[in-house]
Amino acid sequence: MDRSIAPEIKNQIELTKLSVQKEIVNGVEVNYVNGGSAPLLKLELVYNAGSKYQSQPLVASLAFDILRDGSKKINGKAFKESINGLGVYYGMDVFKDFGTLSFFVLERNLNALLDLIKEVITHPNLPEEEFNRLLQKEKNDFMVDCEKTSFLARQRFAEVLFNESEYGKVAHYKDFDNVEYQMSKSFVYDYIVNTPFKFLVSGSISTKSKVLLTNFLESLEISSKGTKKEAKKCNPKKELHIISKDSEQCSVMLGKLLPGKTHPDYHQISITNALLGGYFGSRLMQNIREEKGWTYGIHSTIINYEEATSLVISADVLHDKGDDTFKEIKKEITRLQNELISEKELDILKNYLKGNLLKGFDGAFEQIDRFFSVDSFGLGWSYYDEYIKTLETINPEGIQKISIQYLKWEDFVFVKAGGKHA
């Protein structure tokens, strides 16, 4: 063996994907991902109850907030003490498309937890005084957030990119005076109580646990089929939107609509986005953070909703560098369109993305998240195999072609909050 010659580096990766066992129990779709040695389970109840289903802003978020008060049987402080006594970590959260109840529980406490969950989703307490307290808290938090240019930019960006769609509806100060207790209470009964949900179970799932979970589902009285709402089509306002605010920093956001996960070019778009601004070694980070020192970080992200996919580039920059930041972003996109990336830079990107993908499959809890992120779009595990194949085969010409086709500057929406304005 000649030790002066470095060993050959093999960059091919293979994902160890745990099997997903899918069942329908009492009208509920259950997905089991069994893995891990610790007797710990993660339960997620995913409802079609995201903010796109609400009649006006704040209704859905307050509905899930008051669910935390427990059931008519065990509520308030007693509910929190019961949950904590079982060593359970839990969250009740609302997103654009879905509302979720999530729990981490030791196997030995599963049965007791399921009893509590059943009470919450069939006989929630929903006290009006708690609603009023939470409403006031959210109002106070909103007033604090409105002092931040990043929050103002994010709010306006959603409105102008997802214009005319439910995805673009955000809360304003006046909405806190218009939302009523009965709205959030009705939301809980319309979209959660006795409605079907998608049940995601991951971790070390024993036969005993599975029996308990099946019994829990069979004991529910699912009385409705549930409703699936499709958000309206977006009509982006493709121009610069300025929010004047005297501030020490300037927050910039820009982006555009993109094809979704089911599109044949999606993987190539995702890889190109990572090169542009999706990791620490990206073009935007090297330019605007490392070379210019205008920001601590600039990021380009692809966000997927059921009816809309978007590219979002955001940064908090020096108060007088907002317009210059837009120019430098345009310059980097133009470079991708006009100049081929070097094989060395592409290899660094590929290695980062491979490592990131492997990290996302490290355990049952991570895998159930990866599974749901594709299953909710009607896709399966093969999505990730196709991603790896694209990662292996994409070349500089492919990056350039995608940049030209999907990063047209005239399609972007721009928002600038705070700082100096020309």
Image (cartoon, helix red, strand yellow):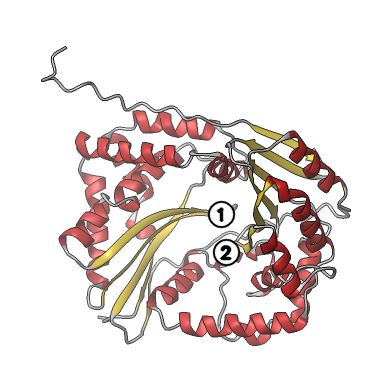
Give the residue at mark 1: 305
- Relative to the observer, which residue lies in front, 200 or 234? 200
Q: Horizontal and vertical percent for residue 21?
A: 69, 33
Residue type at mark 2 is: Tyr
Q: Horizontal and vertical percent for residue 149?
A: 38, 77
Tally of numbered tags: 2
In space, the residues marked 2 and 1 are separated at their CA atoms by 9 Å
Number of other residues with Cα within 10 Å of mark 2, as a class: few under 14, some 14 to 19, many 20 or more:
many
Q: Is residue 348 above or below residue 87?
A: above
In the picture, residue 321 is in which quadrant? bottom left
Question: Which label number is shown at residue 369?
Answer: none
**Residue at point 73%, 72% (across, down):** 69
Do labels 2 and 1 touch, CB within 8 Å?
Answer: yes
Q: Horizontal and vertical percent for residue 399?
A: 31, 40
In the picture, residue 299 is in which quadrant? bottom left
Q: Is residue 226 left or right of residue 353?
A: right
Tell which residue pokes out farthest to the top in this image: 1
Which tag, 2 or 1, sits closer to the chain's start?
2
Q: Is residue 288 above or below residue 376?
A: below
**Residue at point 69%, 58% (across, down):** 86
Q: Horizontal and vertical percent for residue 61?
A: 64, 70
Secondary structure under tag 2 reads helix
Q: Is residue 410 left or right of residue 304?
A: left
User: Quarter of the image containing the C terminus?
Assistant: bottom left
Note whether residue 8 is visible: yes
Number of other residues with Cα within 10 Å of mark 1, as a class: few under 14, some 14 to 19, many 20 or more:
some
**Residue at point 73%, 42% (across, down):** 30
Give the residue at mark 2: 167
